[in-house]
Image: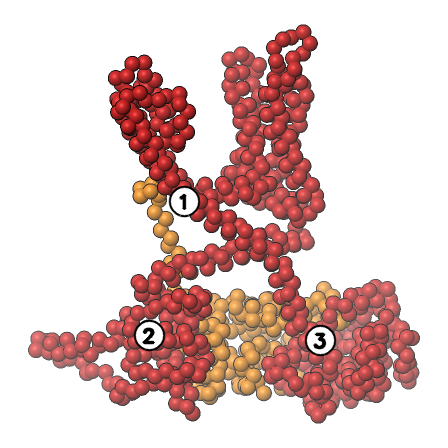
Chain colours: A orange, B red
Amino acid sequence: MLFLSLDKIDDDFELSIVCHRPEGLDKLEAQTNFSKQELQVLYRGFKNECPSGVVNEDTFKQIYAQFFPHGDASTYAHYLFNAFDSAHSGSVKFEDFIMALSTLLRGSVREKLTWTFNLYDINRDGYINKEEMTDIVRAIYDMMGKYTYPALKTDTPKQHVDAFFQKMDKNRDGVVTLDEFILSCQEVNFLYIYTIIIVPPTYSCLLL
Amino acid sequence: MAAGVATWMPFARAAAVGWLPLAQKTMPKPPVDKKSRSDEILFVNVSGLRFQTWKNTLDRYPDTLLGSSEKEFFYNEETQEYFFDRDPEMFRHILNFFRTGKLHYPRHECIQAFEEELAFYGIIPEIIGDCCMEEYRDRKKENQERLAEDTEAENAGDAPLPPDATLRERLWRAFENPHTSTMALVFYYVTGFFIAVSVIANVVETVPCRPIKGSIKDLPCGEKFSVAFSCLDTACVLIFSFEYLMRLYAAPSRCDFARSVMSVIDVVAILPFYIGLVMPENEEVSGAFVTLRVFRVFRIFKFSRHSQGLRILGCTLQACASELGFLLFSLTMAVIIFATVMFYAEKGTKGTTFSSIPASFWYTIVTMTTLGYGDMVPDSIAGKIFGSICSLSGVLVIALPVPVIVSNFARIYHQNQRADKMRAQQKVRQARIRMAKKGATNAFLQHKEDGGLQDGDSDSTPLCVKNRSAFEHQHHHLLHCLEKTTNHEFTDEVTYSEVCVTDSVGFRTSRSTSLSSQQGATTTCCSRRAKRRAFRLANSTVSVSRGSVQELDTLHITKTPAGTQYPQSRSSLNARTEDLKLNCADYTAAIISIPTPPANTPDESLPNSPAIPGILRNSRSSTYNTQETVKISSL
């Protein structure tokens, strides 16, 4: 048995998972609009869900799937993930998360609009063209699922986009720039814009 | 820095003192420890169990949660302690790691729970001490195998095919999982039957039949009914070839399929026939041809597709390849030794059967396996002594690897049984999970029916709405936001299918039956619901694309005069729709939504049915609109 059996070295030695630790509490407090207690609450929730300290895209999609069980939230989650992951590293660290949340919950109107613009600008070229807008809107409609009233038609997103784009694109050059975006949204009394973001339940205290 | 080294920093710095006399340049200033305070006791509260430890203990491992500044996120100012909402029993082991430097694995704990705790506290599992490492590794491997099986059982085959599966995929699925469709099952049994027929024919061919008239000698049946048997053989081979070609066509990866064991068996089963066709009816070659017929018996191995037990046996043999190899090798060794000994022991005897060492091999094997045919027996005393030693040692050598093979077989067998059990339980499990999920999705629809989506005054919200958790509030608000964005509502499957049916037919049957009972019981709810409906429907905004009749274009659009009241009786609900008049340019959302017809008057108790066509009243809706803009809150 000694020399006949090949030594099957079971090397399922998985390298330890990437563990990211955020910067100090004081530093984060200075960089964002949250207080220390709020940061603590946020971090505890974050750490509970992601002990490794980072969120990857699959986790994001799973989270969204739970919140929007009716439809398919994965496409929209993908775009949101890219918006959160400003450094394009493939994972969202706590700092990225907090920065985005700070903008979305406590930021000024212009900051919120800029964030939304970056969300819609999928290829990050500074312009939103009709295809990007259609992709986003289609992703939103996907989240509705199949059973809606009235029933969704295949060109519902497209018509939705047509309407919106016509309004936003002031100089009719086929793209919407950040300034056009901000201008047209402010015309609409932006305070009442629905920014659809997903916030885990532990942050309920911060939402009101 | 390696773990634990932080403790030795003062000693290392003492070494620097030794360099002072020899230094060529002045030493740099030592770093000022701003937060230098004497060692203090920290309080760590883990789910109520209070632990106390020196700060230095935790600082030993600065790349963990407790050793770094990350624990400040968990610091509670009021109670001056660090609070963790985790398992206190496990924390004991974590803290022991900090104290002793060795991480022990508690044997009674679930391996996954332990790993999660380690991940939370930022400790890599490889630090586990040698005393517990083996146990940990074994448990982990077992767990991983089990999980891998589970996911395999989930993915394997029982999931329904996507509807756009090609013919090839469907064929492959039918071949691999015969119980998925009746056609596949039929094919499965037919091939099984023909395998059996072919094998039996091979066997019966050789049985002697009564001789034909005029002859004395017994003929084997194969020659007597040669036409019948060859027809049978041809038919079987044709079916097997057809099956093989179909499998080859359907296989997702043809190379892999061609190299798999089953396909080799298939080829070997049908090849002799084709070689026989090709080969000429020569006398010399027919000897080889006869040999080829022997290979026909391999058709019996095709049964392993039909029998799981055979597959398990094959797996076991594969898994025990090394043990079997050892068995063979040791037997060979023993055979050679004993054959030589017996040969020389019996050399003196007259007329002995032990004519050469290779001839003695036969005796040794027969004796070691305790068969003892008795065609070769030693005569001399020495031969008898060595013969008995041979048989005793034979028993030992064969008995040694057998338990290993048996235990491997048991393990694989149990694995398979578990896989089968898992598959059977999976369906029930999935059904239950689906029901639970549906509960969550239906919660929102239920919530809507309970009148929870009132944008208005809070004191009129029904009690059923108030008693929800904060999380549910947030979640439902989120879903409501999505509805507003897309200007479509969530419904359940029933309503949707109803709507689809009535859409196509052209008139609506309202949900009057389902709602009439509700109407009677909860009148107040309904009226409010109607009011809310009016509010909500009136909260439509204008689409810039004028006159776009969106999803109502399948309905007949007729104009109704502005003054007509909507009939109360639901039985006379007809598909009265109206023109989509455009409203004032009041945007309540940046995303333009499609105008929906608002309900008629709010004080009519209209059922919350999608089949409410209403009458668009410009004046009324505009007032609603302006009211509504104020009420929408921002996130």
Name the chain under label 2: B
Position of B505 compared to B308: left or right?
right
Q: Secondary structure at mark 1?
A: helix
Closer to the observer: label 3 or label 1?
1
- Per the image, the residue denoted by label 1 is B403
Give the number of marks.
3
Left or right of B310, for residue A193: right
Nearer the N terminus, badge 2 or badge 1? 2
Q: Is residue A188 left or right of residue B598?
A: left
Task: Look at the numbered disc 2 and give the secondary structure of its residue.
Answer: helix
Q: Position of residue B236 (x, y in %)?
A: 64, 29
Task: Specify whether disc 2 shares its chain with disc 1.
Answer: yes
Host chain of mark 3: B
Callouts 2 and 3 on one subunit: yes
The furthest residue to the left:
B21
- Image-quadrant location for residue B230: top right
For badge 2, the amino acid type reads: Asn
In the displayed structure, A96 sits above or below B133; it is below
Compare marks 2 and 3 and give the one earlier in the sequence.
2
